[in-house]
Amino acid sequence: MARVTLRDVCKIYPGGVKAVDRVSLDIADEQFVVLVGPSGCGKSTTLRMVAGLEEVSSGTIEIGGRVVNDVAPKDRDIAMVFQNYALYPHMSVYKNMAFGLTLRRRELGLSKSDIDRKVREAARILGIDGLLDRKPKALSGGQRQRVAVGRAIVRDPKAFLFDEPLSNVDAKMRVEMRSEIKKLHRRLRTTTIYVTHDQEEAMTLGDVIVIMKDGRVQQLGSPLEIFQHPVNRFVGDFIGTPPMNFLAGRIEGDGDSVVFNEGGARLPFYGHLAEAARAYRGIELVLGVRPEGLSLDAERARLGAGADVPREALPALDVRVTLVEPLGKEKDVHMATTVHDRIVGRMESHVSVREGEMQRVFVDLRAAHLFEPGAMGRNVSLPMTQEAVRAN
Ligand code: ADP
């Protein structure tokens, strides 16, 4: 097991595409790190450079304290699990799992019985010990994926690299495999780098998640830190379902009062949002509110505004309900203001709202952020500690 460090790593593909742009990561021993971002953001290229399957254009990669830029993939002591499993179709599960070790048996100083023990142990951990004689074509997608993981485990590598390993399995199996991979990591504690485009998968798996866009790291932190303190609008939008709502408006108010003018509707700000917004009076900003922060319940909003704030002075929007989507325990309520035609609130299913009616929806400022305009607009309402994280 080992620490994996990337320093100012860049990848420029022939033809000039800058796929990875000065990525620096310090992945501690035993950590589970997820690289996540939209398609084309450079996450697979980053992983493939760690694996040695792509050359590094500049910067250094260290595995276990050794710079591996010029080390061949097979000598990096890592194991990679791919999206397409890459199993040998003519070999049994047993042979697929044993193959890599058998090939290098002398070099690794392993006896046949060592290999047999490793294969059976890994198969037992993964619950595929009853399938060792089968060929891959006689397995389900989930079972094939387990074989691919098993083949990685038997090598006892310094690090596991997973490249979208669950995108070819169905939704239910994906959720199951996700928790299996997490349990496996709890058990083996092998340093893991996992690539996915699925933010929910990233949130549930990672000790640390790294959000990438256009080859760059946008933010790095625990899932909760990133959810609560997105450094920019892109991150706020990318993490969380349904996504954060974004309302353009202007900061107004005088003296102590700070108000957000949303197309004529005036939302008073309190607490951290008021403090952050004070310096922006007269300026257009974007209010980001999580769907959970919109509710018909004034008390929720009062928790975010202050216990002594009267109902009529709570931040709220007059909306028309355009669609109600029941989800079981909760429902998504789609709403429109005079200037924003799609705002989504996630509310308890017992809340009474009907399509077509007018409602006053309260904004819980604890679930709100202020961003500079533009798709990559900076979050100007972060607590100081998060500012420090961003500066790094
Ligand atoms: P992701 O895994 O986040 O979807 P990739 O790392 O696969 O992104 O790709 C990042 C960028 O590099 C994309 O613009 C992609 O088109 C480009 N790219 C990937 N592989 C190659 C290649 N072999 N040659 C040229 N460009 C590539």
Image (cartoon, rainbow, N blue to C red):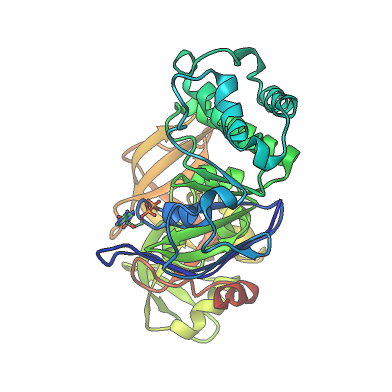
Asked if 371 appears above or below 34 in the picture, the reply is: below
The quadrant of the image that shows the C terminus is: bottom right
Query: For residue 186, what is the image quadrant?
Result: top right
Q: Locate residue 244, reporting x and y percent.
A: 44, 54
Q: Position of residue 370 (x, y in %)?
A: 47, 70
Image quadrant where residue 286 sits? bottom left
153 and 282: which is toward the camera: 153
Where does residue 28 sit, x and y in percent of width and height? 69, 59
From this viewpoint, which residue is outermost toward the left? 15
Q: Where on the image, by quarter, is ligand 1?
A: bottom left
Instruction: Using residue 364 as the reference point, say whether residue 191 is left or right of it.
Output: right
Toward the viewer: 227 or 98?
98
Residue 310, percent from left and from top: 59, 63
Mark yes or no: residue 146 visible: no
Asked whether the viewer can see residue 298, the reply is yes
What residue do we see at 45% from left, 60% from top?
A: 212
Is residue 356 depicted above or below 60 in this figure?
Answer: above
Residue placed most toward the observer, 15 or 90: 90
Count of numbered labels shown in the rendering: 0
